[in-house]
Image: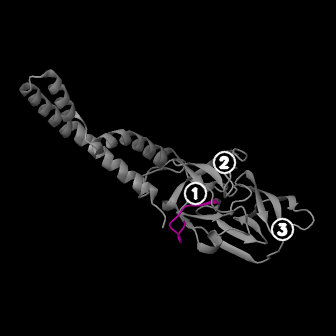
């Protein structure tokens, strides 16, 4: 069972913030009034100072809430409206993203959204073909990351492992066979949306043609590891309301298992 971290963060921030407000406007004045009253009754300065210190002391739950609230609030604002880290769990975006890559996602690239409920409150830009985007797919309540290959109004055709958008072939240039003698996959450089990126395809031909027309508010998503990707070809389109943000950088990499993280793959995402 996965933890809904955004919801947890919102609830924790709200609770600690409420306790902080109650402390400022109610609990602290009450303790101060009780301390003033005790000071007037106790003549011994030493006893008075000790008693007043106990009266003014914050309860442990208040102390923790006051300490954690600003930290939680900063994390909530940064994570919800500016940038959020993710780790790549599968190989569907190889060679652009490797399993174990830690990426940074721009949360405001496609508009400002409220945390948890995802309602857009401010428009910034729209996804473009070629963008690497994080979103929630229609068939699973978890984050996916794929490349945008079809925006609203596009007619997308996939034939013999080549993309055609609105009848225009998206150029692919051969790069390498890996391994060269008995290749398991072939690397191509694909031009999509005016930008170049690498893709992987296997050796087996598939001459069948598939075609989709992308309706308003929907996006066609594909992995760069074309024959090893669960994407819009199988489970449908990504909805505009379930967009999380635009992936723009790899900042850390960790191989699965007992390996130390390193910066061998950090850089901008193309």
> Which label is found at residue 184?
3
Q: Which residue is mark 2?
A: 261
* Magenta: main secondary structure: loop
- The answer to whether 74 appears left or right of 28 in the picture is right
Q: Quadrant of residue 45?
A: top left
Place of residue 58 in the rendered image (x, y in percent of width and height, measured from the top left): 25, 38
Which class describes the residues within 10 Å of circle 1: few (<14), some (14-19), or many (20+)? many
* 140 in the magenta segment: yes
Place of residue 21 in the rendered image (x, y in percent of width and height, measured from the top left): 25, 41
Residues at marks 3 and 2, CA–CA distance in whole angstroms: 28 Å
Q: Quadrant of residue 49?
A: top left
Place of residue 230 in the rendered image (x, y in percent of width and height, measured from the top left): 65, 69
> Which circle, 3 or 2, is nearer the viewer?
2
Residues at marks 2 and 1, CA–CA distance in whole angstroms: 23 Å
- Label 1: state its secondary structure: strand
Q: Quadrant of residue 200?
A: bottom right
Sequence-wise, the earlier of marks 2 and 1 is 1
Above-or-below relation of 26 to 132: above
> Which label is found at residue 57?
none
Q: Which residues are magenta?
A: 137-146
């Amino acid at each position: 069972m996965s933890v809904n971290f955004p919801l947890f963060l919102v609830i924790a921030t709200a609770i600690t913030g409420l306790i902080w407000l109650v402390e400022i406007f109610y609990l602290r004045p009450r303790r101060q009034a009780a301390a003033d009253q005790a000071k007037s009754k106790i003549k011994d300065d030493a006893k008075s100072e000790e008693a007043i210190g106990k009266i003014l002391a914050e309860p442990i739950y208040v102390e923790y809430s006051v300490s954690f609230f600003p930290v939680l609030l900063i994390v909530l604002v940064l994570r919800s409206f500016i940038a959020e880290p993710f780790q790549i769990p599968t190989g569907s975006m190889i060679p652009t993203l490797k399993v174990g890559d830690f990426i940074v996602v721009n949360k405001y690239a496609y508009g400002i959204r409220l945390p948890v409920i995802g309602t857009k409150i401010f428009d910034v830009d729209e996804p473009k073909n070629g963008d690497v985007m994080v979103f929630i797919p229609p068939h699973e309540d978890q984050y996916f990351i794929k490349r945008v290959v079809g925006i609203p109004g596009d007619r997308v055709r996939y034939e013999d492992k080549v993309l055609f958008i609105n009848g225009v072939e998206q150029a692919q240039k051969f790069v390498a066979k890996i391994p060269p003698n008995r290749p398991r996959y072939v690397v191509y450089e694909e031009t999509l949306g005016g930008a170049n990126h690498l893709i992987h395809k296997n050796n087996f031909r598939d001459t069948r043609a598939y075609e989709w027309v992308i309706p308003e508010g929907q996006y066609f998503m594909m992995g760069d590891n074309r024959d090893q990707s669960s994407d819009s070809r199988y489970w449908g389109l990504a909805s505009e309301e379930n967009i999380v943000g635009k992936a723009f950088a790899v900042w850390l990499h960790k191989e699965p298992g007992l390996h130390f993280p390193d910066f061998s793959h950090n850089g901008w995402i193309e």
